[in-house]
Amino acid sequence: MFADTHNHTCHFSPDAEMTIDELISSAADRKIGIVGITEHYEYDNPDPADIIGTFDLEEYGKAFEEWKKKAGDIILLKGIEFGYQTHTAEIIDKISSENSFDQVILSNHLFRGLDVYFSKECYLVDRITRHKEYIGKMAEMADKCRNYDIIGHYDYVNRFNPVKEETVFYEDCKKEFDDLFEVMISKEKALEINTRSIESQIRRFSPYIMPDKAVLKRYLDMGGKLISLGSDSHSSETLGIHFRKTCEYLKMNGVNEVVYFKDRKPLLLTI
Ligand SMILES: [Zn+2]
Ligand SMILES: [Zn+2]
């Protein structure tokens, strides 16, 4: 059985096209027994081109109760994906503590204040500088926020990169990765392996399809034990995408369990 901890529906994430019914039937077809729904919450989104913002948390709570009734044997986890900016750390913690989530993902979608999806200019910045800044910001995010469970897609900054020979290498920004891992490990937060990133690499025929082994090795060597798997699906065709391949890859690299969160508590699943 798989746990896909990162997914969006069209009901609360404006960039998603999947309905809850499509999500449930896709999970049943693909034998994904545990599905995290992590709707986008970008407080004070600075990018005028971006349609993603916040949503009514009370409405989400009510809808989720109905969704659980439809899900049958599939376990739905009520989650949220916060987009971080330095000045939103407190509000993120406040919302997390005032709402009953199963799991909270903390993500950084921005590079120099703009979402990399819209702002391709970030790829004009050389790779090392780009990765040092981006992972450095994630280390700050992991440190400044307290009330979260998972650090989402550390490699998001590479998702729309036109240069197929690049991925986020540990070698690019060792100090920034070490700072990120140190704080995550001390706070017992999980590192997400995002299989949508893998799909992006496949689509652009990158020679670096899987996440950099050195990133994984460093996280484990520093004492990291919590790895989550998320497809970051916005449509039903990608639920659990590349999970089998990714589990094999993780096992080859010394990881035998993945984590998901229920009532904000980590639960391990053997892979
Ligand atoms: Zn995201
Ligand atoms: Zn997402």
Image (cartoon, helix red, strand yellow):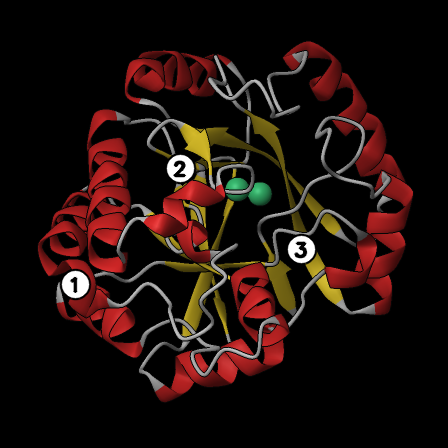
| Image-based side of 42 in relation to 217, left or right | right
Residue under the point 84% across and 50% down: 24
Question: Could you give the CA–CA distance between mark 1 and mark 3, rounded to whole angstroms?
Answer: 26 Å
Mark 1 vs mark 2: give the one in front. Answer: 2
Given residues 249 and 137, the one toward you in this image is 137
List x then y, in percent, for residue 196: 59, 60
Q: Give the number of the disc on residue 270.
A: none
Image coordinates for residue 80, horizontal then vertical, percent: 56, 31
Give me the C-alpha separation between circle 1 and circle 2. 23 Å
Q: Label 1: which residue? A: 223
Position in image of residue 25 (x %, y %): 89, 56
Res. 216 image quadrant? bottom left
* On screen, residue 117 above or below 167: above
Q: Quadrant of residue 90?
A: top left
Q: Amino acid at mark 1?
A: Gly
C-alpha gap between disc 2 and disc 3: 25 Å
Report which residue position mark 2 lands on. 108
Q: Residue furthest left?
A: 175
- Residue drawn at the location 59% of the way across and 75% of the way down: 202
Q: Secondary structure at mark 3?
A: strand
- Nearer to us of marks 2 and 3 is 2
* Image height of 34 relative to 66, above or below: below
